[in-house]
Amino acid sequence: MSLIENKKVENVNNYLNEEIKIIILGAGPTALGALNRIFKLKKENLINENINVCVIEQEEEIGGLARSVIDVNGFCWDLGVHVMGISKYKNFVEAMEECVTEWEIIPRCAMAEMSHVIIENKKEEEENLNKINYYIPYPVQNSIPYFPKNLKLKCLEELNFKEEKEEENNLLTTKITEKEENFDSFSLSLFGETLQKIFVRPYNEKVWTVPISQMGTSWLQGRVPLIDLSQLKRRCSLSHQKLLIEDEKRQTAFRYPANCKGIGEMWKRFSERFPSKIFNFGQKVVEINSKTKNIFCLDKNGNKKKFNYNLLISTIPLTELEKMIGINNLSKPLKHSTVILVGIGLFGGKNDFVKKLSWAYYPRKEILFYRCTIISNFSSELIPKCSSSSSSSSDLIENKNNNQFWSILCEIGQSSDKELPLEKEQKNKIFDKIILDLISVGIINKKENICSKWIKCLPFGYPIPTKERDFVLKECHKYLEKLQIYSRGRFGGWKYELSNQDVCFQIGIELIDKIFLNIPETLYV
């Protein structure tokens, strides 16, 4: 069904009869959502059939940050954790169901490693050899009942104090007040000093790479679940075993495309509905002349190519877009992190805990990664299918039984001010540290099980929701849209809270409706 069906469309822009050329920079979910909407409007005769659209993509394939990479040993790696929950965006659901007919249904098992608070003394650490006992279900605020007695009581005392002030029927509100001007003061008010100290601050500063006092609060609306204090108190009286049983009963599930080489293949299949001639891969944008409306690109051989446009939709990082246009001051205050992805492929040695685990969070500074994901638990398509005649796999994995392979994706946050580890020696140091850390937290048993190592540096990992972000974005878009340039997407829009695949896809759709049909956006506002 059309988004505008049963609605009277008024003040349709002149694009109904005007011949124009639209260029879309990038080929990720936002770009594909916009592209899909353009073709749908053309089919419904709501815009000119002769409107030309062209996609320019730096990489050699579709997907953007939702791409997947297959390493030399046949392990498949997504560029982050991209899973599918229940989406409220009908356009996205219908589009994905058309290109993926079978889905893996995976029980969601998210944990947090909290050995720094669960181990109460050195003797206990020496006696307790089972590192799995240091994990508790995520979110951590709902797992206070798993804490040692004294810590548990302290957290409850702080939450009780908040309840007495609010009197909200045992549901602690997550409403952001004016006095909570940053993430630091907000999390302190919501969770209390102890919970903030042992998890909220260290984990988030590890991910975002900046002090949480520099982060705003607008991105938190609707993202922090309410704490049911009465249930929390009841659960604090349960034994460890009863807590585990109760949590298992409440377990939810997520979906992952079956028979797909990673989430990237899903987007490749989706893109096949469009004419291949509109895609220009391997083209790095180096300059945009907003006056003449020309875009200059370089291919991998250094050859220059010029594109002209009437209307430009960009999903590349906003800061990079403005540099290409020749303006640097508007988006300068925006901050981002870089992310280093490390994939470890293994054969055998998978313990029972890991067989059920989806991903785990690590707040401790001693552990290099902030999250590790047992990505092979999502689909058997993500591990090698080898035979004795295989020429693409190394000798290490030839002739081995496919069902014993498994894989771990680790994510490391790094400040964008630091240089990315591009040299072989630097990468080897990261591999060594990652492997030692995975052993120390009980995910892998020994180095001998490792048969593949992969690393990918993402210069743009997370757009950081700093306190000044929203004001800066407003000024940037005001300037760009006067030039008929629209910037959306994970980094095009610079809003982490609007970065999920389904949201990005819908943002692309809503942008086209805004441009062509004067329908206001509801998501990116």
Image (cartoon, rainbow, N blue to C red):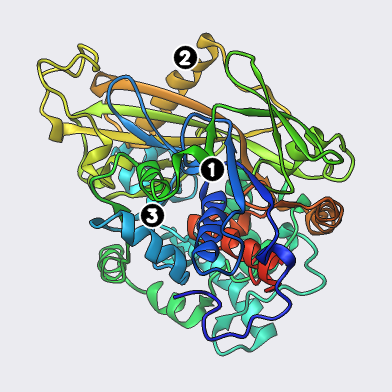
Gap between marks 1 and 3 measured at Cα: 30 Å
Q: Residue at x 72, y 43 (%)?
A: 309
- The image quarter in which residue 467 lies: bottom right
Q: Residue at x 51, y 68 (%)?
A: 153
Q: Residue 438: give x, y in percent of width and height.
A: 38, 32
Q: Residue 107: give x, y in percent of width and height.
A: 28, 59
Q: 31 above or below 370?
A: below
Which amino acid type is shown beneath numbered disc 3? Ala
Q: What secondary structure is found at the residue carrying circle 2? A: helix
Mark 2, residue position: 428
Q: What secondary structure is found at the residue carrying circle 1? A: loop
Which amino acid type is shown beneath numbered disc 2? Asn
Mark 3, residue position: 110
Give the number of marks: 3
Quadrant in which the N terminus is drawn:
bottom left
| Mark 2 crowd level (few <14, some 14–19, many ≥20, 10 Å Cα) | some
Comparing marks 1 and 3, which lies closer to the viewer?
1
Q: 524 above or below 83?
A: below
Q: Earlier in the sequence, mark 1 or mark 2?
A: 1
| Mark 1 crowd level (few <14, some 14–19, many ≥20, 10 Å Cα) | many
Comparing marks 1 and 2, which lies closer to the viewer?
1
Q: Are marks 2 and 3 in contact (CB under 8 Å)?
A: no
Q: Is residue 501 visible?
A: yes
Q: Nearer the viewer, residue 212 or 327?
A: 327
Q: Residue at x 25, y 57 (%)?
A: 101
Mark 1, residue position: 27
Which amino acid type is shown beneath numbered disc 1? Ala
Q: Is residue 192 visible?
A: no
Q: 368 above or below 358?
A: above
